[in-house]
């Protein structure tokens, strides 16, 4: 059975309403959920299904009358904002960096409860996926987030059996995120990694092809050290950059022992490199070689990508999440691209 590991708003609302109608206690009121759903939805531009220009239509007036009713038991599937009406049945992914921890806590816990009710065997996959989808591979930050979740019980996690169940998931199934992701510390894990390395497409020594010449490739990725915040921060130093690209885009024979740690601050976030990888792949490799090859290249050098070396699933999780930044405009990449 397919299980969507994203935290998707319309499915969370549907689950919430179904549980309420079944007489089950939930960690928030419908009004609380509705307010959070609207604020999350408005973080990303959406097209309304009715606009203020249609105010004279009977259809518009019916929705207007419904919109002023008090939210009681269940969450409505639409809302009004500045005279326009929006559909909460549209697919909308909840991202922690966009909604903030307070809102994310609620939706994360509801998704966790949904998986608990449907199939607990997907819990480990859910945690592993969320590590990259919302925490960018920062295992320490995600581990702290998981451990602190029960501490929010006074806000929205009031069911004792849910809290107890959640703690048991951490101890019995997930243990800790570090244990889950670093199984290669054991001899068996090392064998698994070696097997994965021998089967993957981009083997050590493979040179990632490009329609750009070597100088153009180096110039493009120079944003890693050249782009700086107002206080002079960059993702990596020039020395670290030279180490990574000393042989161009060749997959190294052995990964760098002491991986380079991206600065990853709000001013120079890791997603700059995520977006850069996506741009380079679209310009040079789309339909010719998989994006995962470039992810593997950086996984050999950079700590935030190193889990891509462990398994096909982890490589897939990291690579698939890069596409979420197609509209990211903080850095003007054109100045680094060939004219």
Image: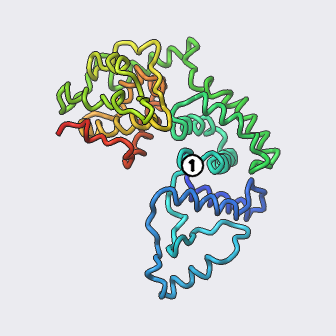
Q: Where is residue 320 shown, x and y percent of the image? A: 42, 40
**Secondary structure at numbered mark 1:** loop
Give the colour scheme shown: rainbow
Residue at 64% in and 63% down: 34
Q: Nearer the viewer, residue 193 or 129?
A: 129
Q: Nearer the viewer, residue 61 or 268?
A: 268
Q: Residue 45: x percent and y percent? A: 45, 60
Q: Residues within 10 Å of mark 1 (few under 14, many from 20)?
A: many
Name the residue that disc number 1 marks.
7
Q: Viewer-proximal residue, 48 or 187?
A: 48
- The answer to whether 63 is drawn above or below residue 146 in the figure is below
Measured as percent of width and height from the top left, residue 117 is found at 69, 48
Visible residue check, residue 268: yes
The quarter of the image holding the C terminus is: top left
Query: Residue visible at 57% across and 36% down?
Result: 125
The structure residue drawn at horizontal position 57% and vertical position 80%, both measured from the top left corner, is: 64
Q: Is residue 44 above or below residue 205?
A: below
Q: Percent x, y for residue 324? A: 42, 45
């Amino acid at each position: 059975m397919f299980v969507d590991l994203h935290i998707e708003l319309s499915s969370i609302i549907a689950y919430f309403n179904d549980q309420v109608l079944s007489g089950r206690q939930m960690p928030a009121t419908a009004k609380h959920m509705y307010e959070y759903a609207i604020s999350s939805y408005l973080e990303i531009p959406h097209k309304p299904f009715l606009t203020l220009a249609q105010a004279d239509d009977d259809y518009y007036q019916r929705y207007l009358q419904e919109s002023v009713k008090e939210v009681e038991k269940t969450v409505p599937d639409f809302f009004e904002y500045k005279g326009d009406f929006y559909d909460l049945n549209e697919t909308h992914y909840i991202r922690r960096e966009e909604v903030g921890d307070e809102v994310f806590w609620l939706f994360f816990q509801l998704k966790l409860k949904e998986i608990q009710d449907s199939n607990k065997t997907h819990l480990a996959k859910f945690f592993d996926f969320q590590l990259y989808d919302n925490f960018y591979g920062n295992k320490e930050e995600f581990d702290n987030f998981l451990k602190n979740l029960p501490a929010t019980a006074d806000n929205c996690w009031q069911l004792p059996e849910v809290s107890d169940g959640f703690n048991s998931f951490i101890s019995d199934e997930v243990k800790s995120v570090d244990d889950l992701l670093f199984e290669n510390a054991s001899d068996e894990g090392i064998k698994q990694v070696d097997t994965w390395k021998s089967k993957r497409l981009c083997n050590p020594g493979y040179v990632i092809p490009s329609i750009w010449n070597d100088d153009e490739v180096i110039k493009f990725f120079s944003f890693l050290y050249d782009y700086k915040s107002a206080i002079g921060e960059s993702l990596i130093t020039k020395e670290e950059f030279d180490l990574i690209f000393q042989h161009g885009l060749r997959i190294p024979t052995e990964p760098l022992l002491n991986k380079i740690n991206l600065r990853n601050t709000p001013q120079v976030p890791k997603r700059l490199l995520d977006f850069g990888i996506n741009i380079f792949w679209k310009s040079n490799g789309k339909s010719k070689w998989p994006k995962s090859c470039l992810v593997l290249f950086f996984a050999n050098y950079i700590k935030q990508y190193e889990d891509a070396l462990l398994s096909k699933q982890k490589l897939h999780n990291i690579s698939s999440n890069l596409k979420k930044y197609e509209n990211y405009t903080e850095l003007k990449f054109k100045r680094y691209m060939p004219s």
